[in-house]
Amino acid sequence: MMKLRNRLSEPTKLQIPMAPMIDIVFLLLIFFMLNLKIVSPEGNFNINLPISAPSAVAAEFTLPEIKVGMVSDRQGNLMQLTLGSKNLGNDEMAFERLNREILKIIGRPGNPLAKDIEVEIDADYETQYKYVVKAISNCTGRLDTGSKQVARYVEKIKFAPPHKPKA
Amino acid sequence: MKMRKIEMGFTEPDMTPMIDIVFQLLTFFMIAINFENTKADERVKLPKDSLAKPPVVKPEHELVLNFGYQRFPSGELRKSRPEVFYNERYVDVYEISPELEQEKRVMERVHGQNAIKDVTVLIRADSEIPTGLVQELIRKCQEAGFSKFSLRATSEEA
């Protein structure tokens, strides 16, 4: 008699079955964990490629054209990096030098006067694409290693007409 | 005499903290997973560059072209010429024009007649491809009517 009264009147805490929920949650967790791909984020370099040939009319004040040249061997390895007529070498430091030369030309990062400066990349047919991207990167700016801030140099990059492959 | 009853065997552990943590993890993985990069092709070994930052403004419409080598699992090249990976097919860069025309038609049908001008072509090219072939691909795209181009690189972990 006592027992029955107890059960009917006393508000008991309702037990929610936890086990199925935990099962599902673990399944979801494992699903998302396995689907997660650790990829480093990708970024873009915009390039400026007008379809028609640039008209001579637009050149009202002609800015000094910056021409980055890349000479390669048949395997596509970089042999020489040039800026205008200046030889910058072909080692790791060549791109550093390019970066410094570009900074010299534009004066200071983000210079509004340098907004219209355009860099033309003129690479041999065989040059491996990674060198071109490296050159573009060193023309567009510099990553400050301390603050992780990017100092912008030249915004406009274009390609010179392609070369013929070496016979 | 009062004696405390000792419960034998089964005791209910407190699940609340564990469930909290599991939900946290679940949320983390759900957010960290990016469905954005589904178009990214792992076969293409992009060049690395520390300046390659994800764009702040996403282009209105984009066409991703994966341009790389067929490789063996060991990393050696299966073919000496790079090809465009287009819908599970391998297309030579000199024969890509029909596909580009088709892309253009689809873009025009979906986004309107002049949408082609707003399409950014994202070129995901392998780091070892000769530059001349990348330029050839760009030229083919220009012939098809595309005018905005972006080169992709992975941001290097410093």
Image (cartoon, rainbow, N blue to C red):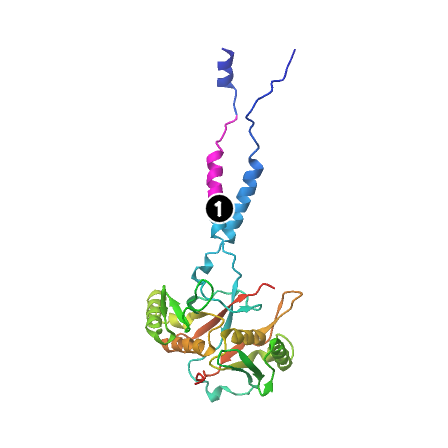
In this view, A116 is above or below B124: below
In this view, B149 is above or below A36: below
Residue, x 53% and y 88% (percent of image)?
Answer: A60
Where's residue A90, x and y in %?
59, 80
Q: Specify the amino acid type for callout 1.
A: Ile
Range of the magenta residues?
A13-29
Where's residue A84, x and y in %?
57, 86
Asked if the stretch drawn in magenta spans residue A106, the answer is no
The image quadrant that residue A167 belongs to is: bottom left
Residue reaching furthest to the right: A146
In this picture, residue B24 sits left or right of residue B76: right
In this view, A67 is above or below B86: below
Where's residue B130, x and y in %?
46, 76
Residue, x 51% and y 59% (percent of image)?
Answer: A39
- Depth order, front residue of A75/A32: A75
> How many numbered tags mark residues here?
1
Of all chains, the one bearing label 1 is: A
Residue picked out by circle 1:
A30
- Depth order, front residue of A33/A157: A33
Asked if the stretch drawn in magenta spans residue A23, the answer is yes
Dot 1 lies on which element? Answer: helix
- Depth order, front residue of B15/A81: A81
- Depth order, front residue of B54/B124: B124
Where's residue A66, x and y in %?
56, 84
Secondary structure, magenta segment, majority class: helix
In this picture, residue A50 sits left or right of residue A90: left
Callout 1: 10 Å neighbours few (<14), some, many (20+)?
some
